Image (tube, rainbow, N blue to C red):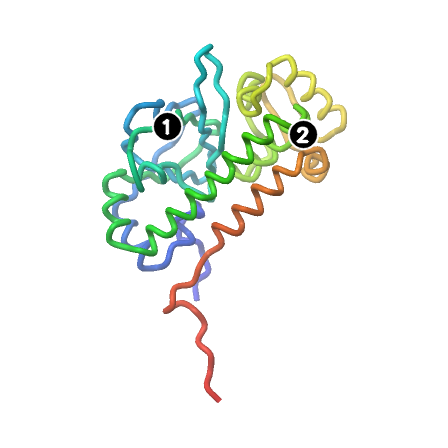
């Protein structure tokens, strides 16, 4: 059997053969540029996005002009689940944090396909639950944990979601990621660099020691990762499941 993934995106790669063939003719490829706004809060989302390498940041806009990240979506998932399953009006803004190619599909088309296939709808629901779990954990993390542990968590998550050790993240972007002030981020980034966990210079970050960052990060990193692994684990259809032999 050919084990080559059908797509660099985990959502697409883990679909059943029937569901992938259902969605495949409607997919297009786009290059998502850094800081591209995919949708603003209150606007109707038109397309769903399935990153191959980049990362999409879900952001809450506050009245004083502040922006706080509540979740990230990368190469193992899909942005647009909540709009596909319900109201297309965006509850938050979505901005490209890490640039890269992505598959896209018209949201109305995805909604229609989910109505045709119970297993596709189930996959969308699981990915929506995973994002919701991340949003919950992020809220608790930002309220309770240190800036250092939060930044370590976000750097590890960005590394996992993008598949790369070299990231282009300004102090402003990192402050938005963890809900902190830029001067606090600068001090913490210097601390992580002195520990040789990262190399940071003018917005360019290279992760040098994943294990070291993992020890610095709060438990929220492992908790979110565990929830994603549980919810997004590929599920066999009855036809794909191994058959036991009689006798």
Residue topped by disc 2 = 149
| Residue occupying image coordinates x 49% and y 54% | 233
Crowding near pointer 1: few (<14 within 10 Å), some, many (20+)? some
Q: Position of residue 62 (x, y in %)?
A: 45, 16
Q: Do the residues labelled 1 and 2 touch (CB within 8 Å)?
A: no
Q: Position of residue 46 (x, y in %)?
A: 27, 32
Label 2: element kind: helix
Judge from the rendering whether residue 179 lies leftward or rightward of residue 217; answer left or right.
left
User: What residue occupies the far top of the structure in this picture?
Assistant: 64
Judge from the rendering whether residue 233 lies leftward or rightward of residue 37; answer left or right.
right
| Residue occupying image coordinates x 46% and y 56% | 234
The residue closer to the viewer here, 236 or 74, is: 236
Q: Height in image: 16 above or below 186?
A: below
Residue topped by disc 1 = 91
Judge from the rendering whether residue 86 lies leftward or rightward of residue 35; answer left or right.
left
> Which quadrant of the figure has residue 144?
top right
Label 1: element kind: loop
| Residue occupying image coordinates x 30% and y 39% | 86
The residue closer to the viewer here, 136 or 74, is: 136
| Residue occupying image coordinates x 69% and y 21% | 188
Mark 1 and mark 2: Cα distance apart in space: 28 Å
Q: Height in image: 9 above or below 190?
A: below
- Viewer-nearest of labels 1 and 2? 1
- The circle on residue 239 is none
> Which quadrant of the figure has residue 166?
top right
- Quarter of the image with the N terminus is bottom left
Q: Where is residue 29 in the image (x, y as percent from the top left)?
A: 33, 38
The residue closer to the viewer here, 77 or 163, is: 77
> Which quadrant of the figure has residue 156?
top right
Q: How many labels does the image show?
A: 2
Q: Position of residue 202 (x, y in %)?
A: 60, 17
């Amino acid at each position: 059997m050919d084990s080559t993934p059908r797509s660099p995106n985990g959502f697409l790669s883990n679909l059943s053969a029937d569901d992938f063939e259902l969605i495949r003719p409607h997919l297009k490829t786009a290059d998502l540029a850094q800081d591209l706004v995919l949708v603003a809060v209150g606007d109707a989302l038109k397309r769903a996005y399935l990153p191959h390498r980049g990362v999409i940041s879900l952001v809450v806009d506050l009245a004083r002009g502040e922006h706080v990240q509540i979740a990230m979506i990368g190469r193992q998932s899909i942005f647009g689940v909540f709009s596909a399953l319900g109201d297309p009006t965006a509850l938050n803004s979505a901005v490209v944090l890490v640039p890269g190619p992505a598959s896209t599909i018209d949201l109305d088309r995805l909604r229609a396909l989910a109505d045709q296939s119970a297993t596709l709808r189930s996959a969308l629901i699981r990915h929506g639950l995973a994002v919701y779990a991340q949003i919950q954990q992020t809220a608790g993390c930002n309220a309770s944990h240190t800036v250092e542990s939060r930044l370590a968590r976000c750097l590890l998550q960005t590394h996992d979601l993008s598949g790369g050790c070299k990231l282009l993240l300004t102090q402003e972007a990192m402050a938005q990621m963890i809900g902190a002030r830029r001067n606090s981020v600068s001090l913490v980034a210097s601390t992580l660099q002195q520990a040789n966990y990262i190399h940071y210079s003018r917005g360019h970050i290279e992760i040098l020691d994943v294990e070291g960052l993992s020890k610095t990060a709060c438990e929220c990193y492992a908790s979110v990762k565990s929830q994603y692994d549980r919810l997004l684990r590929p599920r066999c259809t009855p036809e794909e499941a191994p058959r036991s032999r009689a006798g």
